[in-house]
Amino acid sequence: MPNRAVIKTDKAPAAIGSYSQAVKVNNTIYLSGQIPLVPETMELVSDDFREQAVQVFKNLQAVCEAANGSLDDLVKLNLYLTDLSNFATVNEVMEEMFTKPFPARAAVGVSELPKGAQFEAEGVLVI
C-alpha cells in the first residue's frame, strides 16, 4: 500500500461532498477540482468569468501550498468551462499566475458545474 496522506487547508474552500481537497501519495499530490468559491464565505466570488478563473487558481494555489508546493509544481491541469468562448481568458489568467514551463493541460466544455460556477480546475502536483 502506498504512503497516502490527506492535504487540507482552511485557505481553500472546504469540501462540499465526500472528497478531500487533495491526496498525497509519495511525492505526487492529486488535487480535487476547485470552483470559484471564496473560502471564508463558501459563495461564488462573482458572476464575472475572469474573477472566477482567478479565484479558482487562488484556491488551487492554497492547496498546493498546504502540500508544500506551488502552482508552478503542477504537472497536469484539467479545466472545465461551461462556455468555451472563455478559453482565451483562462490562458490570460494562467500567464499571469503561472511561470513557464506551463503544465500539461486539457480543457473540456461542460453543461453545468456545482453551485452555478462557470469554471473548475483540478490537477496533479509533483514536489
Image (tube, grey):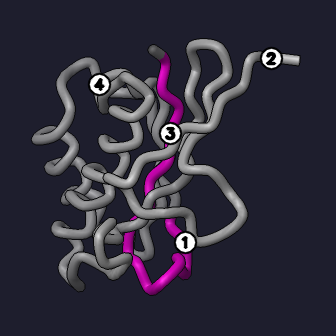
Pair 1/3: label in front: 3
Residue range in magenta is 109-126
Quadrant in which the C terminus is drawn: top left
The answer to whether residue 106 of the structure is visible from this angle is no
Q: Residue furthest left?
A: 96
Q: Is residue 87 magenta?
A: no
Q: Mark 3 points at which residue?
A: 123
Label 4 to label 3, Cα distance in Å? 12 Å
Q: Tag 2: residue type?
A: Pro
Label 1 to label 3, Cα distance in Å? 17 Å
Label 3 to label 2, Cα distance in Å? 20 Å
- Which residue occupies the foreground of this view, 43 or 110? 43
Which of the two labelled residues, at mark 1 and mark 2, occupies the earlier sequence position? 2
Q: Mark 4 points at which residue?
A: 72
Tag 3–tag 2 contact (CB < 8 Å) = no
Q: Taking 46 as reference, is 93 above or below it?
A: above
Pair 1/4: label in front: 4
Residue, x 80% and y 17% (percent of image)?
2
Residue 84: give x, y in percent of width and height.
38, 67
- Which residue occupies the foreground of this view, 2 or 78? 2
Relative to 5, is 45 on the left or the right? left
Residue, x 38% and y 54% (percent of image)?
10
Q: Taking 90 as reference, is 47 above or below it?
A: below
Tag 1–tag 2 contact (CB < 8 Å) = no
Label number found at residue 110: 1
Residue 98 position by quadrant: top left
Q: Is mark 3 on a helix, strand or loop?
A: strand
